[in-house]
Image (cartoon, rainbow, N blue to C red):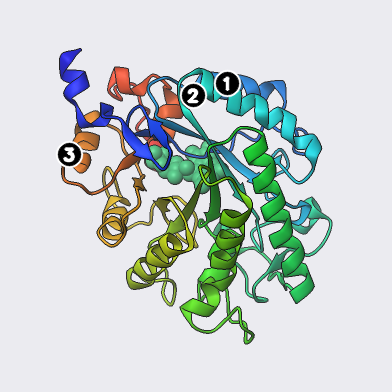
Amino acid sequence: METMIAHPVWQSVALGAHRLRNRLVLPPMASQTGDDTGLVTAATVAHYTRTVRPSQGLAFVEYTTVHPWGRSEPQQLALYTNAHEAGLAQLAALIRRQGVVPGIQLTLAGGKTDATLIGRQATGASALAVPAHGGDLPPPAPLTASEITELMDAFVESALRAERAGFAVIEVHATHGYFFNQWLSPITNQRDDAHGGSLAGRAGLLLGLIRRMKAALQPETVVSVRFAAQDRLPGGLTLEDGVWLAQALEAAGVGLLNVSSGLGGWRRGREQRGEGYLVADAAAMRREVGIPVIGVGGIQTLAYAQTILAQGDVDLIAIGRAMLANPDWPWADAAPVAQQALTV
Ligand SMILES: Cc1cc2nc3c(=O)[nH]c(=O)nc-3n(C[C@H](O)[C@H](O)[C@H](O)COP(=O)(O)O)c2cc1C
């Protein structure tokens, strides 16, 4: 037991006004257990009862849409009405009961959805198909100025609902090819108005939203952004763009960075091999900012987690599929993780 306490993974850490009991994070992972209108169901409660454990310091509730146009899966959770609040409050409370700090990820699908699901043509920055699902998505309809305002208002309102529901960390999903990734990336944003052009133009919508959220939320509520340090696609966001963005997000008031993969989705590219296939990206961001950084991607062993913490590559470590496969992963040291599940 003594050696476990000395292990850097178990050292507590401050996250703004909050204290995480250790460095392990349950990342947002869609359970797809909402009802047809995005309400939390008994299956959602059962899912988080199983997956949230005292072995985690911070646990995120999965991507939750802030607007009906932003849905990307039929059983996705939603937070675009007050009626959605109570179920999510139940999830925040069950996370807190485990001594874990509760986070929630808020999202919009943008062009990465299906017209049959949202009842209209998908919306995006430009009429350019999002490289996802094998490239078979139709081009979205570029948003008008009033539609942009409607979506950003919905984001802020949902963030306020999430705060009222008891979430300490509210994460904006800005990667994996969804809405903000589409606006940030030159592959999918070729607008010729103020929202396009330079990286500063493409990032303006996200940075403006962060500033609005910071002004509307309580000071102790941490705003997190999950973003890609690079798209890893020709003509996409580069690591240099990632550094610029990380620093701009910090300056706008973001308190936590969750560094994942880009436009093509969260699965690793063919050239990316081994445990921690995205940790170098997270480390590159951490060197350039003063706020905590989460690293993620194929992490399977406590030994690896210890090494990257000791090296100062990241502050927090998200364990996704290994925790889903065995929520008591840290105690079992990843032994039962199905190799197949980790090679997708
Ligand atoms: C079933 C499943 C659902 C996921 N849903 C989300 C999600 O809602 N939001 C998100 O940002 N990432 C999502 N991801 C990506 C994970 O958060 C994580 O980044 C990814 O699984 C890589 O980490 P791992 O190798 O530890 O599993 C999902 C992953 C899985 C396996």
Which amino acid type is shown beneath numbered disc 2? Val
Q: Which of marks 2 and 1 is nearer the N terminus?
A: 2
Task: Give the labeled residue for mark 1.
Answer: 94
| Quarter that holds the N terminus | top left
Q: Is mark 1 on a helix, strand or loop?
A: helix
Q: Report how far apart the C-alphas of labels 1 and 3 lie in the structure.
A: 31 Å
In contact (CB < 8 Å): disc 2 and disc 3? no
Q: Is mark 3 on a helix, strand or loop?
A: helix
Where residue 84 appears, as percent x and y from the top left, is 76, 36
Which amino acid type is shown beneath numbered disc 3? Thr
Task: Give the labeled residue for mark 2.
Answer: 52
Residue 178 or residue 224, whichever sits in front: 224
Position of residue 66 in the picture relative to residue 221 (left or right): right
- Residue lying at 66% horizontally and 29% vertically, measured from the top left: 89
Q: Which tag is nearer the camera, tag 1 or tag 3?
A: 1
| Quarter that holds the C terminus | top left
- Residue lying at 58% horizontally and 45% vertically, measured from the top left: 218
In contact (CB < 8 Å): disc 2 and disc 1? yes
Where residue 198 appears, as percent x and y from the top left, is 49, 83
For mark 1, does the 10 Å Cα neighbourhood hold few (<14), some (14 to 19), or many (20 or more) residues?
A: some
Q: Which mark is residue 307?
A: 3
Q: Report how far apart the C-alphas of labels 2 and 3 lie in the structure.
A: 24 Å
Q: Which of marks 2 and 3 is nearer the N terminus?
A: 2
- Residue lying at 69% horizontally and 41% vertically, measured from the top left: 161
Q: Which residue occupies the extreme bottom position in the image?
A: 192
Which amino acid type is shown beneath numbered disc 1? Leu
Where residue 132 appears, as percent x and y from the top left, is 56, 60
11 versus 3 height, above or below: below
Where residue 18 appears, as percent x and y from the top left, is 43, 35
